[in-house]
Amino acid sequence: MFARARYELPVEGGPLVITPLGAAEGDRLGVVFAAIDPWAAYAYPAAALSRFLAASEPAAQRLQLSLGDDVAGAAVIRTRWLRGPYLQFLAVVPGLQGRGIGSTVLRWMEREARMARERNLWVVASEINAGAMRFYERHGFEPTARLDDLVCDGRTEILMRKRL
Ligand SMILES: CC(C)(COP(=O)(O)OP(=O)(O)OC[C@H]1O[C@@H](n2cnc3c(N)ncnc32)[C@H](O)[C@@H]1OP(=O)(O)O)[C@@H](O)C(=O)NCCC(=O)NCCS
Protein backbone atom coordinates (compact mmCIF):
# COMPACT_ATOMS: atom_id res chain seq x y z
CA MET A 1 0.00 0.00 0.00
CA PHE A 2 1.17 3.53 -0.83
CA ALA A 3 4.53 2.02 -1.79
CA ARG A 4 5.31 4.02 -4.93
CA ALA A 5 7.55 7.08 -4.76
CA ARG A 6 5.13 9.06 -6.92
CA TYR A 7 1.43 8.91 -7.75
CA GLU A 8 -0.31 11.09 -10.33
CA LEU A 9 -4.06 11.41 -10.00
CA PRO A 10 -6.43 13.39 -12.20
CA VAL A 11 -8.03 16.49 -10.62
CA GLU A 12 -9.30 19.76 -12.03
CA GLY A 13 -6.22 21.85 -12.82
CA GLY A 14 -4.18 18.70 -12.16
CA PRO A 15 -2.68 16.21 -12.05
CA LEU A 16 -2.47 15.87 -8.29
CA VAL A 17 0.99 14.50 -7.53
CA ILE A 18 1.65 12.57 -4.31
CA THR A 19 5.28 12.18 -3.23
CA PRO A 20 7.14 11.75 0.07
CA LEU A 21 7.12 14.95 2.14
CA GLY A 22 10.61 16.29 2.83
CA ALA A 23 11.53 17.52 6.29
CA ALA A 24 11.99 21.14 5.21
CA GLU A 25 8.61 21.26 3.47
CA GLY A 26 6.96 19.51 6.44
CA ASP A 27 8.45 22.12 8.70
CA ARG A 28 7.06 24.94 6.55
CA LEU A 29 3.60 23.38 6.19
CA GLY A 30 3.34 22.97 9.97
CA VAL A 31 3.35 26.78 10.26
CA VAL A 32 0.78 27.13 7.44
CA PHE A 33 -1.65 24.62 8.95
CA ALA A 34 -1.25 25.81 12.56
CA ALA A 35 -2.80 29.08 11.34
CA ILE A 36 -6.05 27.46 10.12
CA ASP A 37 -8.81 25.53 11.87
CA PRO A 38 -9.05 23.04 13.45
CA TRP A 39 -5.45 23.54 14.66
CA ALA A 40 -5.87 27.29 15.22
CA ALA A 41 -9.04 26.67 17.28
CA TYR A 42 -7.04 24.22 19.41
CA ALA A 43 -4.16 26.73 19.69
CA TYR A 44 -2.00 23.86 18.49
CA PRO A 45 1.63 25.12 18.48
CA ALA A 46 3.10 25.56 15.00
CA ALA A 47 6.38 24.07 16.21
CA ALA A 48 4.63 20.84 17.27
CA LEU A 49 2.80 20.54 13.95
CA SER A 50 6.06 21.21 12.08
CA ARG A 51 7.86 18.55 14.14
CA PHE A 52 5.09 16.05 13.41
CA LEU A 53 5.07 16.70 9.64
CA ALA A 54 8.88 16.78 9.35
CA ALA A 55 9.34 13.53 11.28
CA SER A 56 10.21 10.26 9.62
CA GLU A 57 8.33 7.11 10.66
CA PRO A 58 8.33 4.07 8.41
CA ALA A 59 4.85 3.02 9.56
CA ALA A 60 3.33 6.48 9.02
CA GLN A 61 4.28 8.01 5.71
CA ARG A 62 4.42 11.79 5.39
CA LEU A 63 3.13 12.73 1.93
CA GLN A 64 3.22 15.93 -0.06
CA LEU A 65 0.29 16.84 -2.31
CA SER A 66 1.23 19.01 -5.30
CA LEU A 67 -0.73 20.63 -8.07
CA GLY A 68 1.59 21.80 -10.83
CA ASP A 69 4.33 23.85 -9.16
CA ASP A 70 2.20 24.50 -6.07
CA VAL A 71 2.38 22.57 -2.83
CA ALA A 72 -1.32 21.81 -2.29
CA GLY A 73 -1.23 20.08 1.07
CA ALA A 74 -0.04 17.15 3.13
CA ALA A 75 -1.26 13.79 4.34
CA VAL A 76 0.01 11.31 6.90
CA ILE A 77 -1.13 7.71 6.57
CA ARG A 78 -0.45 5.14 9.27
CA THR A 79 -0.31 2.20 6.94
CA ARG A 80 -1.52 -0.80 8.93
CA TRP A 81 -3.55 0.38 11.87
CA LEU A 82 -6.74 -1.53 12.69
CA ARG A 83 -7.38 -3.96 9.88
CA GLY A 84 -6.79 -1.02 7.55
CA PRO A 85 -4.92 2.27 7.23
CA TYR A 86 -5.49 5.31 9.44
CA LEU A 87 -5.42 8.74 7.80
CA GLN A 88 -3.72 10.54 10.64
CA PHE A 89 -3.48 13.93 8.94
CA LEU A 90 -5.00 15.54 5.86
CA ALA A 91 -4.91 19.22 5.02
CA VAL A 92 -5.17 21.21 1.82
CA VAL A 93 -3.76 24.75 1.76
CA PRO A 94 -6.51 27.38 2.06
CA GLY A 95 -6.29 28.66 -1.54
CA LEU A 96 -6.78 25.18 -3.01
CA GLN A 97 -9.54 23.81 -0.77
CA GLY A 98 -12.88 22.86 -2.28
CA ARG A 99 -11.42 21.76 -5.64
CA GLY A 100 -11.60 18.01 -5.16
CA ILE A 101 -8.07 17.42 -3.87
CA GLY A 102 -9.16 15.93 -0.51
CA SER A 103 -11.75 13.71 -2.26
CA THR A 104 -9.11 12.48 -4.71
CA VAL A 105 -6.79 11.55 -1.82
CA LEU A 106 -9.58 9.59 -0.08
CA ARG A 107 -10.46 7.69 -3.25
CA TRP A 108 -6.77 6.88 -3.83
CA MET A 109 -6.37 5.69 -0.24
CA GLU A 110 -9.42 3.46 -0.63
CA ARG A 111 -8.14 1.99 -3.89
CA GLU A 112 -4.76 1.18 -2.37
CA ALA A 113 -6.36 -0.37 0.72
CA ARG A 114 -8.75 -2.48 -1.34
CA MET A 115 -5.88 -3.78 -3.47
CA ALA A 116 -4.13 -4.82 -0.25
CA ARG A 117 -7.37 -6.54 0.86
CA GLU A 118 -7.74 -4.33 3.92
CA ARG A 119 -11.13 -4.22 5.64
CA ASN A 120 -11.37 -0.61 6.85
CA LEU A 121 -10.28 2.99 6.45
CA TRP A 122 -9.97 5.13 9.59
CA VAL A 123 -9.80 8.83 10.32
CA VAL A 124 -10.26 11.03 13.39
CA ALA A 125 -11.95 14.44 13.14
CA SER A 126 -12.53 17.06 15.77
CA GLU A 127 -16.16 17.40 16.83
CA ILE A 128 -15.91 21.14 16.09
CA ASN A 129 -14.77 20.47 12.52
CA ALA A 130 -18.26 20.13 11.02
CA GLY A 131 -16.98 20.66 7.45
CA ALA A 132 -14.49 17.82 7.73
CA MET A 133 -17.06 15.49 9.35
CA ARG A 134 -19.45 16.17 6.48
CA PHE A 135 -16.64 15.63 3.99
CA TYR A 136 -15.76 12.21 5.46
CA GLU A 137 -19.40 11.17 5.83
CA ARG A 138 -20.01 12.00 2.18
CA HIS A 139 -17.17 9.59 1.40
CA GLY A 140 -18.79 6.78 3.38
CA PHE A 141 -17.11 7.17 6.80
CA GLU A 142 -19.33 6.65 9.86
CA PRO A 143 -18.78 8.03 13.36
CA THR A 144 -17.65 5.04 15.43
CA ALA A 145 -16.46 6.35 18.81
CA ARG A 146 -16.26 9.57 20.79
CA LEU A 147 -12.80 10.20 22.18
CA ASP A 148 -13.14 12.84 24.89
CA ASP A 149 -10.08 14.85 25.94
CA LEU A 150 -7.88 13.00 23.43
CA VAL A 151 -5.89 15.95 22.07
CA CYS A 152 -6.56 18.34 24.95
CA ASP A 153 -8.96 18.68 27.85
CA GLY A 154 -12.47 19.81 26.97
CA ARG A 155 -12.34 18.79 23.30
CA THR A 156 -13.79 15.68 21.69
CA GLU A 157 -12.48 13.80 18.66
CA ILE A 158 -14.66 11.48 16.60
CA LEU A 159 -13.16 8.24 15.33
CA MET A 160 -14.65 7.53 11.89
CA ARG A 161 -14.58 4.26 10.00
CA LYS A 162 -15.26 3.27 6.44
CA ARG A 163 -15.87 -0.42 5.92
CA LEU A 164 -14.44 -1.75 2.69
C1 LIG B 1 -11.23 18.94 4.80
C2 LIG B 1 -10.29 19.04 3.62
C3 LIG B 1 -9.10 18.11 3.78
C4 LIG B 1 -11.08 18.63 2.35
O1 LIG B 1 -10.22 18.75 1.22
P1 LIG B 1 -10.73 19.59 -0.04
O2 LIG B 1 -9.76 19.41 -1.14
O3 LIG B 1 -11.04 20.98 0.35
O4 LIG B 1 -12.07 18.77 -0.31
P2 LIG B 1 -12.90 18.58 -1.67
O5 LIG B 1 -12.72 19.76 -2.55
O6 LIG B 1 -12.58 17.24 -2.21
O7 LIG B 1 -14.38 18.55 -1.06
C5 LIG B 1 -14.87 19.75 -0.47
C6 LIG B 1 -15.66 19.43 0.79
O8 LIG B 1 -14.79 19.45 1.94
C7 LIG B 1 -15.48 20.03 3.04
N1 LIG B 1 -14.69 21.10 3.61
C8 LIG B 1 -14.27 21.13 4.88
N2 LIG B 1 -13.57 22.22 5.13
C9 LIG B 1 -13.51 22.91 3.97
C10 LIG B 1 -12.94 24.16 3.58
N3 LIG B 1 -12.25 24.92 4.44
N4 LIG B 1 -13.07 24.58 2.28
C11 LIG B 1 -13.76 23.82 1.39
N5 LIG B 1 -14.33 22.65 1.72
C12 LIG B 1 -14.22 22.20 2.99
C13 LIG B 1 -16.80 20.50 2.57
O9 LIG B 1 -17.74 19.55 3.05
C14 LIG B 1 -16.73 20.47 1.06
O10 LIG B 1 -17.91 20.00 0.54
P3 LIG B 1 -19.06 20.97 -0.03
O11 LIG B 1 -19.04 20.65 -1.49
O12 LIG B 1 -20.26 20.51 0.72
O13 LIG B 1 -18.65 22.38 0.26
C15 LIG B 1 -9.78 20.49 3.39
O14 LIG B 1 -10.85 21.35 3.16
C16 LIG B 1 -8.95 21.01 4.55
O15 LIG B 1 -7.73 20.86 4.55
N6 LIG B 1 -9.59 21.66 5.52
C17 LIG B 1 -8.86 22.23 6.65
C18 LIG B 1 -8.12 21.17 7.47
C19 LIG B 1 -9.03 20.05 7.94
O16 LIG B 1 -10.11 20.25 8.44
N7 LIG B 1 -8.53 18.81 7.76
C20 LIG B 1 -9.22 17.62 8.18
C21 LIG B 1 -8.81 17.31 9.59
S1 LIG B 1 -9.50 15.77 10.08
Image: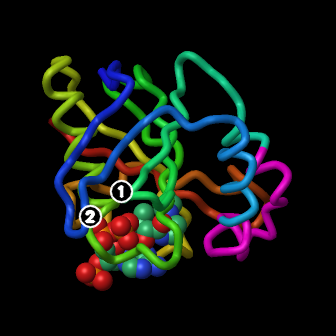
Question: Could you tell me which residue is drawn at 30 percent across and 52 percent down?
Answer: 16
Front residue of 2/18: it is 18
Specify the farthest residue to the front. Answer: 69
Local SS, label 1: strand
Q: CA distance from mark 1 to mark 2?
A: 8 Å
Front residue of 157/111: it is 111
Local SS, label 2: helix
Q: Is residue 133 visible?
A: no
- Within 8 Å: ligand 1 and the Cβ of disc 1? no
Front residue of 142/38: it is 38
**Three-letter amino acid code at the position of disc 2:** Glu
> Which residue is identified by label 1?
143
**Dot 1: few (<14), some (14–19), or many (≥20) neighbours within 10 Å?**
some
> Which residue is identified by label 2?
137
Q: Nearer the viewer, mark 1 or mark 2?
A: 2
Question: Could you tell me which residue is drawn at 34 percent across and 19 percent down?
Answer: 3
Query: Seen in the image, is 102 located left or right of residue 115?
Result: right
Q: Is residue 39 magenta?
A: yes
In this picture, is 56 found above or below 124? above
Dividing the image into four quarters, tell me where ligand 1 lies: bottom left
From the top left corner, tell me how far across and down residue 1 is, in percent.
30, 21
Main SS type for the magenta part?
loop
From the top left corner, tell me how far across and down residue 123 is, in percent.
42, 47
From the top left corner, tell me how far across and down residue 70 is, in percent.
47, 61
**Three-letter amino acid code at the position of disc 1:** Pro
In this picture, is 136 found above or below 64? below
Which contiguous range is marked in magenta?
33-50
Q: Is residue 164 magenta?
A: no
Residue 113 falls in image quadrant: top left
Query: Seen in the image, is 5 located left or right of residue 53?
Result: left
